[in-house]
Amino acid sequence: MTQHQFEKNLEKLGITLPVPVAPVANYVTFVQTGNLLSVSGQLPLDLDGKLPYQGKVGADVTPEDAAKAARLCAINIISQINKACGGDLSRVVRIVKLGAFVNCVDGFAAQPAVVNGASDLMVEVFGDVGKHSRSAVGTNALPLNVPVEIDALVEIS
C-alpha cells in the first residue's frame, strides 16, 4: 500500500490524526534503531487531548467502551508513527507488535476483546501490513486511571 492508500483509509474511517503527545516524564515517545521504530505506550486521548474513558474495565468502564479506548490508543500510535516518518506513512513496512495493558478488575478475562479495538484499526488502516503479534495483559492500575495503554513496534523503511 502507498501513503495515499493509508491516508485514504484514515480519511474513509473519519480519522484525523491528532498532534502527537509530548512525553510527560523521563522518556521519549518513540525511538528508531535501524529499521525498527519503538513507540512508547499511548493513552486513549481524543483530538482535544481529553480522556473520554477512565476507570477499571469491569467496574467503571464497559468492555465495549474499553475497546473504543484501545482504538484511540491506536490512533495516537499512528500519529507517533507519522511524526517519526516525517509525515510519510508509506514508510511503514509492517506493524510488528502491539503491547497492550488493560486496567481491569480481578477476574476480568476479556483483555483480547478489548485490545481488538486497536488491532482491528491497524488492519483497517494498513491492510495486511497492519497484521501484528501482540500481548494483551490485565493490570490493576494505569497512569491517569485510563482503562488501556498500548505501545507498538513498527518496521519502517
Image: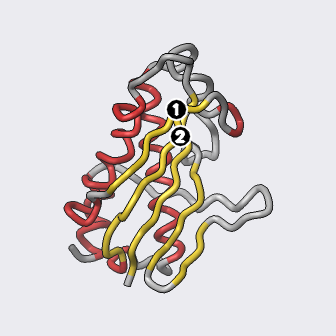
* Closer to us: 73 or 104: 104
Q: Name the spot of residue 151 as percent of width and height, x first.
A: 52, 55
Q: Name the spot of residue 21 as percent of width and height, x first.
A: 64, 58
In the image, residue 32 sits, relative to residue 111, either above or below, namely: below
| 104 horizontally vs 156: left or right | right
For the C terminus, give its image quadrant.
bottom left
For disc 2, the marked residue is: 101
Q: Secondary structure at mark 2?
A: strand
For disc 1, the marked residue is: 138
In the image, residue 78 sits, relative to residue 104, either above or below, namely: below
Q: Are marks 2 and 1 in contact (CB under 8 Å)?
A: yes
Identity, as a three-letter code, of the amino acid under mark 1: Gly
Q: Residues within 10 Å of mark 2 (few under 14, many from 20)?
A: many
For the N terminus, give its image quadrant.
bottom left
Identity, as a three-letter code, of the amino acid under mark 2: Phe
| 154 horizontally vs 21: left or right | left
* Closer to us: 121 or 47: 121
Cα distance, mark 2 to mark 1? 6 Å
* Closer to us: 77 or 113: 113
Q: Residue at x 35, y 74 (%)?
A: 92
As drawn, the residue found furthest toward the right would be 26
Label drawn at residue 126 = none
Q: Secondary structure at mark 1?
A: strand
As drawn, the residue found furthest toward the top would be 59
